[in-house]
């Protein structure tokens, strides 16, 4: 069987604690009467709890790209690829979403870093932040890696489209492989950047989000300690300190077992840690972590069948490599031993 290189497309949910008590967005009863909801889309696969969009008052969205000249393997052509990805989203939104590339750090907008990640698969990370008007800030990290093949530009285009999609409020992934917003993407070796395009489903989904509009804040009973723990874990995940993140999220969930944001981030930690071992061909550890991810999915009220299948197929692939559940258990033992070590 041909092994597909997994592109790590991580999306984290970050919740701020607000100074006067705490607030979270109330799940909005989406107005799905708009005809766009009848066209192919994956709006229902997204998490309504986190869905939000940029308010019209913030258009064009300022995009600030941190200087990348010193970043290893960075090429100025990537900026053009990023701009073409933004233009595609403008087109997809029928001009409702527009962008303005700026030279000075703006107060709100999309902040893009190109970073060098030698020895890793091409990948990207996004975080979106909101305030009382809707989305206000998004950070996007685009990881540059020399792949020594013609797919480098096509891969960068796929990552730019995907991460900008998250930055625009698509919180979650498409269950259909082939959509730019699917959790795992792959490009063909001979594909050019121009050939990597949003699908109709990607386009219709952003139109659904825009049809619903930005969310309004409502007070909630959320506990500030729980939110702080979740935010701490988010930082740990970004530093790829998955072990600490899992520990922090478990503390968070002990305090508030129904805190869905932490449960989602726990999945992010298991899945991405698993992918790290998968790409390093450490099948035993990868299998163990994918299985932990599955356990999280099974604890969910409404588990997503496509996400479950995705984790299951990754787990099965690991097991086909001669790894047994036993050696996955061995990884568990190693993790536990490691946790006992003094830090
Ligand atoms: Zn993603």
Image (spheres, rainbow, N blue to C red):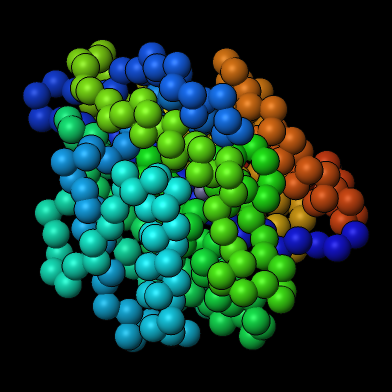
Q: Quadrant of residue 153?
A: bottom right
Q: Is residue 34 above or below residue 136?
A: above
Q: Is residue 301 above or below residue 130?
A: above
Q: Work out which quarter of the rendered image holds the C terminus and state it.
A: bottom left
What x and y, as percent, mark residue 154? 59, 71
What x and y, as percent, mark residue 124? 48, 60
Q: Is residue 19 above or below residue 331?
A: above
What x and y, as percent, mark residue 113? 34, 67
- Residue at point 21%, 17% (across, down): 218
- Residue at point 86%, 63% (across, down): 2
Q: Quadrant of residue 112?
A: bottom left
Is residue 216 something one can see in this rendering?
Answer: yes
Is residue 12 something one can see in this rendering?
Answer: no
Give whichever of 175, 317 is nearer the camera: 175
Side (left or right) of 168 relative to 264: left
Side (left or right) of 73 relative to 13: right
Marker count (numbered)? 0
Q: Is residue 333 above or below residue 276?
A: above
Q: Work out which quarter of the rendered image holds the N terminus and state it.
A: bottom right
- Residue at point 64%, 56% (across, down): 185
- Residue at point 69%, 27% (across, down): 305
Q: Residue furthest left?
A: 20
Give whichever of 297, 30 is nearer the camera: 30
What x and y, as percent, mark residue 195? 61, 67
Side (left or right) of 10 relative to 96: right
């Amino acid at each position: 069987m041909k092994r597909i290189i997994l592109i790590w497309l991580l999306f984290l949910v970050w919740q701020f604690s607000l100074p006067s008590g705490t607030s979270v967005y109330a799940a909005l009863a989406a107005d799905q009467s708009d005809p766009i909801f009848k066209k192919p889309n994956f709006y229902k696969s997204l998490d309504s709890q986190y869905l939000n969009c940029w308010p019209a008052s913030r258009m064009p969205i300022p995009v600030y790209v941190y200087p990348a000249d010193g970043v290893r393997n960075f090429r100025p052509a990537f900026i053009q690829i990023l701009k073409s990805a933004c233009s595609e989203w403008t087109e997809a939104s029928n001009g409702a979403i527009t962008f303005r590339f700026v030279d000075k750090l703006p107060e709100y907008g999309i902040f893009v870093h190109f970073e060098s990640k030698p020895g890793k698969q091409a990948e990207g990370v996004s975080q979106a932040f909101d305030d009382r008007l809707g989305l206000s800030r998004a950070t996007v990290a685009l990881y540059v890696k020399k792949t020594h093949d013609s797919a480098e530009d096509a891969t960068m285009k796929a990552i730019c489209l995907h991460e900008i999609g998250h930055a625009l409020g698509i919180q979650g992934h498409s269950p259909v492989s082939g959509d730019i917003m699917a959790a795992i993407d792959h490009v063909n070796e001979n594909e050019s950047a121009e050939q990597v395009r949003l699908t109709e489903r990607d386009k219709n989904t952003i139109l659904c989000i825009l049809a619903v509009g930005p969310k309004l804040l409502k007070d909630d009973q959320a506990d500030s300690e729980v939110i702080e723990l979740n935010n701490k874990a988010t930082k740990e995940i970004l530093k790829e300190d998955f072990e600490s993140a899992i520990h922090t999220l478990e503390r968070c969930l002990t305090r508030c077992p129904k805190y869905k944001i932490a449960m989602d981030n726990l999945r992010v930690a298991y899945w991405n840690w698993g992918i790290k071992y998968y790409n390093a061909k450490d099948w035993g550890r990868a299998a163990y972590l994918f299985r932990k991810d599955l356990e999280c999915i099974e604890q969910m009220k409404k588990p997503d069948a496509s996400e479950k299948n995705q984790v299951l197929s990754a787990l099965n692939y690991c097991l086909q490599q001669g790894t047994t559940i036993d050696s996955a258990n061995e990884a568990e033992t190693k993790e536990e031993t490691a946790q006992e070590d003094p830090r």
